Image: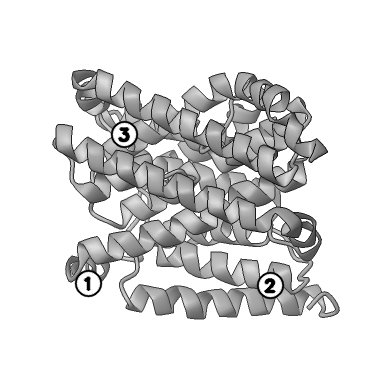
Amino acid sequence: MENLPRAIQWLILLLASLLLGFGLLALHVPAALLLGPMIVGVAMGLLGASVRIPKPYFIGAQAILGCMIAQSLSPNILTPLLADWPLVLVVLIATLLASGFSGWCLVRFSGLPGPTGAWGSSPGGASAMVAMAGDFGADVRLVAFMQYLRVLFVATAAAMVARIGLGSEAMQGHAALEWFPSLDWRFLGTLCVAFGGAWLGPRLRIPSSALLLPMIVGAALHSTGTMTLQVPEWLLALAYTLIGWSVGLCFTRPIFLLALRTLPQMVVSIVALMLFCAGLAWMLTQFMPVDLLTAYLATSPGGMDTVAIIAAGSRVDITFVMAMQTLRLFTILFTGPAMARFISNYATPAQST
């Protein structure tokens, strides 16, 4: 694949993604236009493709996704969380401890450096974890591989769970899509919110700012009636595709070979964390008025952007999902450095065995 001209690689990437993405869409799989390009990207990355999605395009796609999420948020987003704050706190702490234990086990039984295991196993926004990992002595290549491997697992599992949970309702949801609605000044306003947030966020050094700033600003404008956001389906499909390609193409052959020695331990830790979070989701349904699918997506340890895409196509309470995901992201951002130091100090004996 690496010997093919870049133009041919782009053509293969585009055509294969369209074929698989719309094939999954025809099967009514949620987030089909994310999963299809992601799977094609993984295959091409491992085959040696040299094409990459420029970072500004990935940031722009996250900003568009932030505006999509903002349409579903309202000032009462915190009401269910505040009403059951002890349970929410238990879920956040349990997820944090589980991810820490997962990172400790990886370092203890695979020989990964402590900071790499800690940041690689943190279930926050994948791009934010990768961006911060290098500042704490972690191997950014392995952290990126671990984070996006978990994103791949979680996105696939969550889409399948959503498809099973939706059943025949998924067909109705896809049939109602209007791909090319008429646009007006609100579309330009939405683009200003998206790209303004994407431009400002990195300058303020806010983790996951490309997603969070447009989401917060857009929600404020949308919920107060100042401006109704307009995000057409064709633009969302483009954003989903860019995010899928960005994740998939991270799985390059050199990084895969570097991670191969510890790949079984990584997979076991990812599956164990997913099962643990699924158990937390079931617990939430026993004490809060949320359905299992909503709770599952709210507690899924994947990238916040990919979970949002699946939630948007799954008829769940996206407000609750994003509130839980955002709270967990900020919790991990505040506690991640301390956890990395703890794992580095107390899991190092495994390196001498």
Query: Which amino acid type is marked by label 2?
Result: Met
Report helix, strand or loop for mark 2: helix
Give the image quarter of residue 185.
Answer: top left
**Front position in the image: 110 or 199:** 110
- What residue would you read off at disc 3? 227
Nearer-the-camera pick, 9 or 119: 119
Q: Quadrant of the N terminus?
A: bottom right
Front: mark 1 or 3? 1
Whether residue 288 can be seen here: no
| Residue 117 sits above or below residue 157 on the image | above
- Res. 89 in view: yes
**As drawn, 79 above or below 162:** above
Query: Upstream in the sequence, badge 1 or badge 3?
Result: 1
Callouts 2 and 3 close, C-beta under 8 Å: no
| Relative side of 79 to 207, left or right | left
Q: Outermost residue toward the right?
A: 3
Sort mark 1 into few (<14), some (14-19) or many (20+) by Cα contacts within 10 Å.
some
* Secondary structure beneath label 3: loop
Residue at image mark 2: 44
- Marks 1/3: CA distance? 31 Å
Which residue is depicted at the point 61% across and 39% down? 105
Foreground residue among 224 and 11:
11
* Nearest to N terminus: mark 2 or mark 3: 2
Residue at point 52% right, 50% down?
A: 270
| Residue 298 relative to residue 224: left or right | right
Of badges 1 and 2, nearer the viewer stands 2
Q: Disc 1 designates what residue?
A: 171
